[in-house]
Amino acid sequence: MGESSVIAVYLLESDDGLILVDCGPETVFEGLKTAIAAEGYDWQDVRHVLLTHIHFDHAGAAWKFAQNGAKVYVHPIGLAHMQNPEKLWNSAKRIYQGAMESLWGEMHPIDPELLVAVDEGDRLTLGGVQVDVHYTPGHAVHHNAYQIGDAVFAGDVAGVKIHGGPPVPPCPPPDIDVDAWKRSIQTLRDLNPTHLYLAHFGAVDAPLAHLDALEATLDDWAMWIKPHFDAGAAPAEVTTDFVAYTQEQLRKAGVSEADLTRYEAGNPSFMSVTGLMRYWKLKEAGRL
Ligand SMILES: [Zn+2]
């Protein structure tokens, strides 16, 4: 979409080819190939793709690597959708409508023999690289974080933070569960990582302070939405005020106008309003 520093993927060496953590949507596949080549590697040497979760901006291009024989690791709840993405695609289409192809490109089924379900407590050894799997729901019910040594690759459960700005929680429907998310933040704290890597975008300097700030903003945003939910407002009626509220928070924290655009690209406000409204609805119905 012409923005840089919005979607990150991570490339690791192993004795069994390259490992990717997340792979972005299919629309960035050509850019990813170029970026891998610029680091002196060949994308065709990617043998393992660790998906933090199956949202398209993380997992949309996984089938391209699988077509080349790479194994794709994913939480069991997300696995069926990677094997047969039609239902996932159609449900996303209700939100994105005509923008599906321009945002996400194409998505094709992955051969079940190349899909590996990974869940809490699993330990993988990929070409000599030990990967510990931590189930971390809250942002998505199919979300894992991957620990390699003193580094944790946290997908979206550790929030969005662009160019040193403050961390914010991406809250798209349909899985937002603030209580589960806070437990997952505690899971990450307990790992006490030296290095914490986000999908949006990059490495975090001080992981524990980052996680504290993320949790505070998650609570703050959820409580900002609550009275609007109680009043029966539709997400579209609330989004303008939510954008004003959250952008003021970001500006006060010193975020530049260019980075405000990146925050919105990595974490669209309409999605967060809709996701948090749904959270309150399910919570009130006793379904969380
Ligand atoms: Zn996500």
Image (cartoon, rainbow, N blue to C red):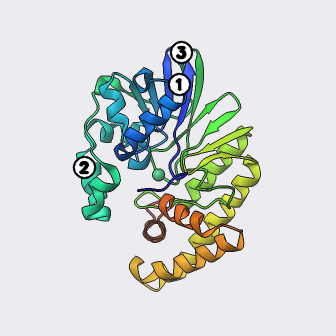
Q: What's the residue type where badge 3 is placed?
A: Gly
Q: Which label sits in the foreground, 1 or 3?
A: 1
Q: Ligand 1 closer than 8 Å to the CB at disc 2?
A: no
Q: Residues within 10 Å of mark 2 (few under 14, many from 20)?
A: few
The residue that mark 2 highlights is 87
Q: Earlier in the sequence, mark 2 or mark 1?
A: 1
**How far from the left and from the top, in percent, is residue 152?**
64, 37
At 58% from the left edge and 43% from the top edge, which residue is drawn?
154
Q: Which mark is drawn over residue 40?
A: 1
Place of residue 283 in the rendered image (x, y in percent of width and height, measured from the top left)? 48, 66
Quarter of the N terminus within the rendering: bottom left
The label shown at residue 127 is 3
Query: Residue at coordinates 57% horizontally, 60% vertically from top-left?
Result: 169
The residue depicted at 53 percent of the width and 82 percent of the height is 227
Q: CA distance from mark 2 to mark 3?
A: 34 Å
The answer to which of 245 and 218 lies nearer the viewer is: 245
**Is there any visible trace of residue 226 in the rendered image?**
no
Q: Nearer the viewer, mark 2 or mark 1?
A: 1
- Spatial CA span between label 2 and label 1: 37 Å
